[in-house]
């Protein structure tokens, strides 16, 4: 099915339509019930009258009459006090004996169902001369004479009343429906006022007012979850915004230092004529700064690719002893120059990780540990199994304790716990960020704690033998 770009129906329209359908259905049902109840009342009323008329006529026929004229006079007085009623007496063969008006129902009588005495099921509707009659034909036998007694009621009054009643009823129902829908629209409009208020407050939030939060206690209970979620989203945005802002400041600082060095050295070199050796030394110095810039840019590009999922780890089974020994052999000379020793603890464990990634992340952790370990102290590298499905590779250095408020940001790019912005060594501030990206790319997790020692714990999935 093709997708459409049509705007979804408004909330007000949805609620009003739902209420409209419900109200129309309910009012139609109520109107039908009322109309049916009134029609049933008229049927019961007419049925009672037809019974009384038939019984009155039968009572006259049961009497002895000297002649047909006397019988007709008696039948003319059989029913009194009823309006719009007609009765007629016929023989079983259809011969008209008496009729209370000039309306002759003989043709309808002979085809209508009949039975001895009153039978409600034999009540029928007749149409004659634009009038509708509710009629009952009853058989009556007396003194070897068989009669058909017919009682009929003109329903014109009933129909006129029902027609006017239905018109009035539908006008009332329509007015009620319109009133209910207007009230519903007003109620929905009023009910959405808190949302309009929230929308205005949200609109006022700017980048320089990221600390603004919506008050959960001043919104209806139905909106508390939404406000809570929105505030949580603002917390995350503010945190990321601050990190991005700090990142921009830090990268500007990191780029400014080598560029300033290059410009200053070049300006000094051009102040006077120098010999070839001095120019070569100047170029070598500038080359070092340019290489530092190139490495920083390469690391940032690599981090960006990793965080965007563009670099996939090719995991393999690694032996912790083999990987740690290879790196310790590589760092032995550096540690010896810094008067630092390595202590290897734990057992050999197997785990999943790309070898190049593991050696790079462990190399960064060892470089970081050497940078912050005082001379004469030791760095501990420990490998152990944690539970049934994890291994932990730890790098522990006895450097200065890192304050707890800095630990969550230690793996951010260019983040410094010391605000003096003076780095120790040649680090560009991306080493720990690269470590975390490598660990994450291999499905692992890294945790840092700092008390008497600073400890980096790297967790990988254990290979079950």
Image: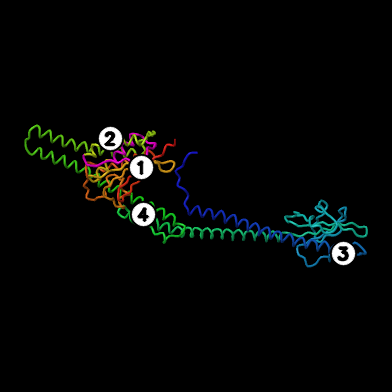
**Residue named by callout 2:** 329
Choose mark 1 or mark 3, whichever is in front.
Answer: 1
Q: Position of residue 101 (x, y in %)?
A: 80, 60
Q: Position of residue 190 (x, y in %)?
A: 46, 60
Q: Is residue 113 above or below residue 443?
A: below
Q: Are marks 1 and 3 in contact (CB under 8 Å)?
A: no
Residue ranking furthest to the top: 276
Residues packed near mark 4 inside 10 Å, few (<14), some (14 to 19) or many (20 plus): few
Q: Mark on residue 458?
A: 1
Q: Are marks 3 and 2 in contact (CB under 8 Å)?
A: no
Choose mark 2 or mark 1, whichever is in front.
Answer: 2
**Residue named by callout 4:** 203
Q: Earlier in the sequence, mark 4 or mark 1?
A: 4
Q: Are marks 4 and 1 in contact (CB under 8 Å)?
A: no
Q: Mark on residue 60?
A: 3
State the residue at coordinates (44%, 55%). 225
């Amino acid at each position: 099915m093709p997708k459409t770009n049509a705007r979804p129906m408004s909330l007000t329209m949805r609620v009003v339509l739902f209420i409209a359908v419900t109200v129309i259905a309910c009012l139609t049902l109520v109107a039908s019930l009322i109309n049916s109840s009134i029609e049933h009342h008229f049927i019961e009323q007419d049925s009672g009258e037809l019974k009384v008329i038939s019984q009155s006529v039968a009572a006259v026929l049961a009497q002895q009459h000297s002649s047909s004229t006397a019988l007709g006079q008696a039948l003319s007085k059989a029913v009194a006090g009823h309006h719009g009623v007609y009765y007629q007496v016929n023989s079983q063969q259809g011969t008209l004996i008496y009729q209370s008006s000039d309306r002759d129902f003989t043709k309808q009588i002979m085809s209508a169902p009949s039975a001895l005495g009153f039978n409600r099921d034999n009540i029928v509707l007749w149409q004659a001369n634009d009038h509708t009659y509710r009629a009952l034909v009853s058989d009556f036998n007396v003194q070897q004479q068989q009669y058909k007694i017919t009682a009929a009621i003109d329903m014109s009054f009933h129909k006129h009343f029902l027609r006017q009643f239905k018109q009035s009823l539908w006008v009332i129902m329509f007015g009620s429906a319109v009133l209910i829908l207007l009230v519903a629209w007003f109620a929905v409009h009023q009910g959405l006022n808190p949302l309009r208020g929230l929308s205005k407050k949200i609109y006022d939030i700017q980048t320089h007012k990221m600390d603004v939060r919506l008050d959960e206690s001043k919104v209806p209970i139905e909106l508390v979850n939404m406000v809570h979620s929105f505030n949580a989203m603002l917390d995350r945005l503010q945190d990321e915004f601050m990190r991005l802002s700090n990142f921009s400041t830090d990268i500007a600082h990191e780029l400014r230092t080598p560029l300033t060095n290059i410009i200053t050295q070049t300006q000094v070199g051009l102040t006077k004529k120098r010999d070839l050796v001095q120019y070569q030394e100047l170029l070598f110095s500038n080359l070092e700064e340019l290489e530092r810039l190139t490495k920083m840019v390469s690391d940032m590009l690599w981090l960006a690719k990793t965080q965007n999922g563009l670099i996939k780890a090719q995991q393999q089974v690694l032996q912790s002893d083999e990987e740690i020994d290879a790196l310790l052999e590589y760092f032995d000379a550096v540690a010896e120059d810094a008067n630092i020793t390595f202590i290897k603890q734990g057992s050999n464990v197997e785990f999943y990780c790309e070898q190049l990634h593991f050696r790079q992340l462990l190399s960064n952790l060892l470089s970081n540990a050497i940078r912050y370990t005082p001379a004469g102290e030791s760095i501990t590298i420990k490998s152990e199994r944690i539970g049934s499905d994890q291994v932990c590779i730890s790098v522990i250095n006895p450097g200065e304790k890192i304050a707890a408020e800095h630990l969550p940001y230690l793996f951010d790019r260019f983040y410094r716990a010391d605000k003096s912005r003076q780095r120790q060594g040649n680090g560009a501030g991306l080493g720990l960020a690269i470590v975390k990206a490598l660990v994450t790319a291999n499905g692992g997790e890294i945790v840092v704690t700092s008390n008497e020692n600073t400890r980096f714990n790297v967790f990988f999935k254990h290979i079950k033998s």
